[in-house]
Image (tube, rainbow, N blue to C red):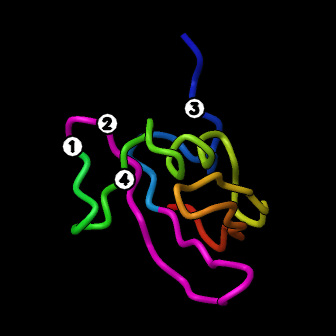
Amino acid sequence: SEKPVKNRISIGSQVLLQETTTKKSSTFTIVAPIEASPLEMRISSQSPVGNALLQHKSGDIVDVETPGGMVTYKIKKVS
């Protein structure tokens, strides 16, 4: 089985994201779909944002197709 790559985003990762346009920062935890709770900032690994973030690392820029259009995030921190 594959070992998770250190500091790459996977289920259980806590991720600090910054929207590149608004500069608004948010911290999310990537969780299994059954544990997802947007109000608690727990986003599903299968959601548009969660899926786009998987395997990325701190410093990466990620474009996410959301229902409201394309959003670009900078990954500020992964823990």
Which of the pair 27/58 is nearer the observer? 27
Q: Residue at x 73, y 84 (%)?
A: 21
Q: Position of residue 25 (x, y in %)?
A: 54, 84
Which of the pair 76/6 is nearer the observer? 76
**Front disc: 3 or 1:** 1
**Front disc: 2 or 3:** 2
Q: Height in image: 49 above or below 76?
A: above
Image quadrant where residue 46 sits? top left
Q: Which mark is residue 35?
A: 1
SS category of the residue bearing label 1: helix
Compare marks 4 and 2 and give the one earlier in the sequence.
Answer: 2
Cα–Cα span, label 4 and label 2: 8 Å
Dot 2 and dot 1 residues touching (CB under 8 Å):
yes
Q: Height in image: 24 above or below 43?
A: below
List the single residue furthest toward the front.
Answer: 68
Dot 3 and dot 1 residues touching (CB under 8 Å):
no
Cα–Cα span, label 2 and label 1: 5 Å
Q: Is residue 59 magenta?
A: no
Q: Which mark is residue 56?
A: none
Q: Height in image: 8 above or below 3?
A: below
* Residue underneath mark 2: 32
Image quadrant where residue 59 sits? bottom right
Look at the image and tell me in which quarter the N terminus lies: top right
Q: Which mark is residue 4?
A: 3
Which region is colored magenta?
15-35
